Amino acid sequence: MSQAAVSQHLRLLRDSGLVEVRTAGRHRVYRLRREGFADLRDWLAALDRFWTARMADLDAYLEKERQ
């Protein structure tokens, strides 16, 4: 991965509020912002509940068709 690609990804993460950056001399130090991931965790939990329910529905349908 090129330096430009890494910089672009880090900029996107910073702009999204998922990381924060501080300057240390000539370097930039990035740190994850745990609170920035709250919305992502909620979305993933909702997605998990959705697919769990859909798979249960499919299982019930297939069981019914099998009988």
Image (cartoon, rainbow, N blue to C red):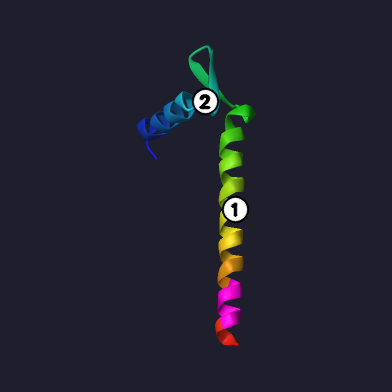
Q: Residue furthest top?
A: 25
Quarter-of-image position of residue 6: top left
Assess disc 1: are there few (<14), some (14-19) or many (≥20) residues with their C-alpha within 10 Å of its C-alpha.
few
Earlier in the chain: of badge 1 and badge 2, it is: 2
Assess disc 2: are there few (<14), some (14-19) or many (≥20) residues with their C-alpha within 10 Å of its C-alpha.
some
**Residue 4 x %, y %:** 36, 31
- Please report the residue visible at 52 percent of the width from the left and 11 percent of the height from the top: 25
- Please report the residue visible at 60 percent of the width from the left and 80 percent of the height from the top: 63
**Disc 1 from disc 2: Cα separation:** 23 Å
Quarter-of-image position of residue 64: bottom right
What segment is highlighted magenta in the picture?
Answer: 59-64
Q: How many marks?
A: 2
Q: Which mark is residue 57?
A: none
Which tag is nearer the camera, tag 1 or tag 2? 1
Task: State yes or no: residue 60 in magenta.
Answer: yes
Say which of 34 and 3 sits in front.
Answer: 34
Residue 67, compared with residue 1, is above or below; it is below
Amino acid type, callout 2: Gly
Task: State yes or no: residue 40 in magenta.
Answer: no
Query: What secondary structure is the stretch in magenta mostly built from?
Result: helix
- Please report the residue visible at 59 percent of the width from the left and 73 percent of the height from the top: 59
Residue 25, compared with residue 5, is above or below; it is above
Q: Residue furthest right?
A: 34
**Residue 31 x %, y %:** 59, 25
Q: Which mark is residue 48?
A: 1
Per the image, label 1 sits on a secondary structure element best described as: helix
Amino acid type, callout 1: Asp
**Residue 36 x %, y %:** 58, 29
Q: Which mark is residue 17?
A: 2
